[in-house]
Image (cartoon, grey):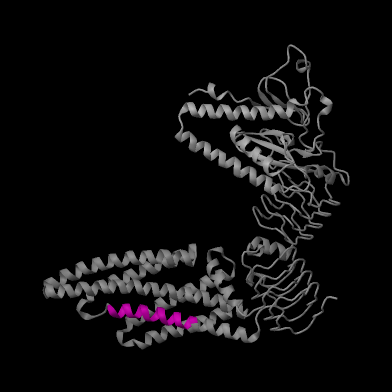
């Protein structure tokens, strides 16, 4: 019987490695609890409170304030030291040069930090500091040497040059100190805000400490003069202001400040609730508070995060929660008209979510559950949907061009009136291949499931810029070696798509389609690259001979697939693809025994069929016979123009 910890105080408890399948933690306080490596399948964490215990919160905030104090003192003393170094009376004429260096470097650092993030600003500021320091050293040395020679002689000039070089270097050091101070303030402010949950209050406290540090540094060297003190305070205050800005943007989720945010969250999760490497399959975190929680490497398959709080402040590693778009969808369930192009939603719990008109092109939905999800007019072009549960989902008007499903994809009781098979209309038309074809016709209950059950037994591979015979043969032979059920008869269709060609292969129900596509792409692309290298090394005659050989092998392969049905049309296999049907229609010209038998090689698809007739071309047509496309037989390589 599953254990019930509902409503209990479990702060700091150790559940490491335990089997807690189906356990109930409803409303429990699990701050600081350790669930590392635990099995928590179907566990219920509804309304639980995770995160840091109070003593850890106080400790981490204190550390943050201490770091802020150190950074404030560092920037204050560094800027003050440079200002003091360049204020002796004997070279007062040249104090503007190191000041300019500091201002230039700080300006570059501040601007780029705001525009590109703290990492980009620090790198550019360091480079600018080095260059500006060198320029300042050169200019100061030249001016000081000239002045010293005129007044005191060569010996004094040498000393002045050394002082100028050292001063310019000190200016760069001061700028680096201010930059480091700003980074430390930003990190400390973000940590304090994440840990304390006080946001602006925590940052305001840090600012006060930094200001105190800068004032202390200025006061400690007040004898250097009011100007030096004022300069130190300005630099320290500017660095503090930049730190506050970076912390604010990091907390707001600005991707440019992702480095600071990730550091702060990792630090703030120290001592918090740990689900590291735990199995949370089908676990329920509805309305739970997950601040300062460690979810790295946890199994989050179908884990429910509906209406959770502060999930954005949990340490999620490289899981699907790392994507802000995905995280918000899992929390709110609202993806209306939003873009998830290329998003990783593998194993996501999307029960009942609203994805009306959402763009899921090339997204990975494998193993996800979209039970009763609204996918009306959603774009599922090239979406991976292996082992995905679409039970009772709403598919009206969805675009399903080249989406990848298999026998494990559940389409039970899908509500679908019609779908589109093309993302964009055919050139010059508004035809997006609606199914059913006629605008007044809709699927009856169960029709959609039956239609795509056949598609589950096929793999569609898009060949860019047409067919390369040598690469085609090499890739197909590799598939036949690795998959015993794939034979030349597995070719179900070859359809022209503008400049590309869509190859449809029939595969057994449980075949790993992703593996088939991966092997094909690897071999096909490798052979194309090998051809390009060979063309650079071999003579023209050798290239022609090689191309002729592979082209004939390709022709024999295609001819062998279709010619076997010319004798008896009744032997034509029934189509496994409901969109492209393969038949071979014999004609009077193809009658066996006829003296006029057409021995040319031509494969024609007309009205969804493939016909071996004509003279060396592959003709393609749609199911209603309104469109006919022809891929002409490639000329013999030996006949190509040089």
* Residue 97 x/y as whole percent: 28, 70
Residue furthest to the top:
595
**In magenta segment, residue 74:** yes
Q: What residue is at 81 percent from the left and 32 percent from the top?
A: 573
From the viewer's side, name the closer residue of 476 and 290. Answer: 476
- Counting every numbered tag in the picture gives 0
The relative height of residue 397 versus residue 222 in the rendered view (above or below) is above
Asked which quadrant contains residue 336, the reply is bottom right
Location of residue 574 in the rendering, given as x and y in whole percent from the top left corner: 82, 34
With respect to residue 274, does 112 lie above or below? Answer: above
- Residue 295: in magenta span: no
Residue 164 sits above or below residue 566 on the image: below
The answer to whether one can see residue 198 in this image is: no
Q: Main secondary structure of the magenta part?
A: helix
The quarter of the picture where the N terminus appears is bottom right
| Residue 552 in view in this figure | yes
Q: Residue at x 32, y 77 (%)?
A: 82
Q: Position of residue 318 (x, y in %)?
A: 62, 64
Q: Nearer the viewer, residue 191 or 491?
A: 491
Occupied quadrant, residue 484: top right
Q: Which residues are magenta?
A: 67-85
**Residue 505: x percent and y percent?**
72, 39
């Amino acid at each position: 019987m599953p254990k019930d910890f509902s409503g209990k105080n479990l702060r700091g408890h150790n559940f490491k490695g335990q089997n807690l399948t189906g356990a109930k933690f409803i409303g429990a306080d699990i701050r600081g609890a350790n669930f590392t490596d635990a099995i928590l399948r179907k566990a219920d964490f509804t309304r639980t409170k995770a995160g840091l215990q109070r003593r850890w919160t106080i400790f981490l905030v204190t550390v943050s304030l201490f770091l802020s104090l150190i950074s404030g003192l560092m920037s204050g003393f560094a800027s003050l030291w440079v200002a003091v170094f360049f204020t002796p009376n004997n070279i007062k004429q040249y104090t503007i040069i190191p000041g300019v260096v500091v201002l230039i470097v700080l300006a570059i650092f501040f601007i780029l930090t705001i525009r590109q993030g703290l990492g980009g600003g620090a790198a550019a500021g360091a480079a600018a500091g080095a260059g500006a320091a060198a320029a300042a050293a050169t200019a100061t040395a030249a001016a000081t040497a000239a002045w010293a020679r005129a007044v005191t002689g060569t010996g004094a000039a040498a000393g002045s040059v050394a002082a100028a070089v050292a001063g310019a270097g000190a200016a760069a050091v001061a700028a680096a100190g201010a930059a480091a101070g700003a980074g430390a303030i930003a990190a400390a402010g973000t940590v304090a805000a994440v840990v304390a949950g006080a946001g602006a209050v925590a940052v305001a406290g840090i600012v006060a400490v930094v200001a105190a540090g800068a004032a202390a540094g200025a006061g400690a060297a007040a004898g250097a003069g009011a100007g030096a003190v004022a300069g130190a305070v300005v630099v320290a205050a500017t660095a503090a202001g930049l730190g506050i800005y970076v912390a604010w943007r990091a907390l707001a989720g600005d991707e440019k400040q992702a480095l600071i945010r990730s550091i702060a969250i990792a630090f703030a999760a120290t001592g918090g609730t740990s689900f590291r490497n735990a199995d949370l399959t089908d676990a329920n975190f509805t309305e739970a508070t997950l601040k300062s929680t460690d979810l790295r490497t946890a199994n989050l398959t179908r884990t429910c995060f509906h209406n959770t709080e502060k999930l954005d402040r949990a340490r999620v590693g490289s899981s699907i929660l790392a994507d802000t778009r995905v995280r918000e969808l899992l929390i709110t369930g609202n993806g209306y008209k939003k873009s998830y192009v290329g998003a990783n939603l593998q194993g996501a719990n999307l029960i009942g979510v609203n994805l009306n008109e959402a763009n899921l092109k090339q997204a990975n939905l494998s193993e996800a559950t979209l039970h009763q999800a609204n996918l009306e007019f959603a774009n599922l072009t090239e979406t991976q949907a292996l082992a995905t549960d679409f039970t009772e989902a709403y598919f009206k008007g969805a675009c399903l061009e080249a989406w990848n499903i298999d026998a494990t994809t559940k389409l039970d009781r899908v509500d679908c009136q019609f779908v589109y098979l093309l993302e964009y209309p055919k050139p010059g038309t508004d035809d997006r291949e609606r199914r059913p074809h006629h605008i007044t016709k809709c699927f009856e209950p169960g029709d959609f499931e039956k239609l795509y059950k056949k598609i589950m037994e096929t793999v569609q591979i898009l060949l860019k810029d047409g067919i390369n015979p040598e690469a085609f043969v090499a890739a197909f032979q590799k598939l036949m070696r690795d998959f015993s059920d794939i034979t030349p008869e597995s070719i179900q269709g070859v359809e022209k798509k503008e400049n590309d060609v869509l190859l449809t292969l029939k595969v057994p129900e449980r075949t790993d389609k992703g593996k088939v596509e991966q092997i094909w792409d690897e071999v096909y692309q490798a052979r194309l690259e090998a051809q390009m290298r060979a063309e650079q090394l071999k003579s023209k005659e050798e290239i022609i001979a090689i191309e002729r050989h592979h082209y004939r092998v390709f022709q024999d392969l295609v001819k062998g697939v279709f010619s076997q049905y010319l004798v008896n049309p009744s032997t034509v296999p029934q189509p496994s693809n409901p969109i492209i049907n393969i038949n071979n229609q014999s004609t009077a010209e193809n009658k066996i025994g006829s003296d006029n038998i057409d021995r040319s090689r031509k494969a024609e698809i007309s009205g969804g069929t493939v016909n071996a007739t004509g003279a060396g071309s592959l003709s393609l047509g749609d199911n209603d016979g309104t469109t006919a496309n022809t891929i002409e037989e490639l000329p013999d390589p030996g006949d190509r123009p040089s």
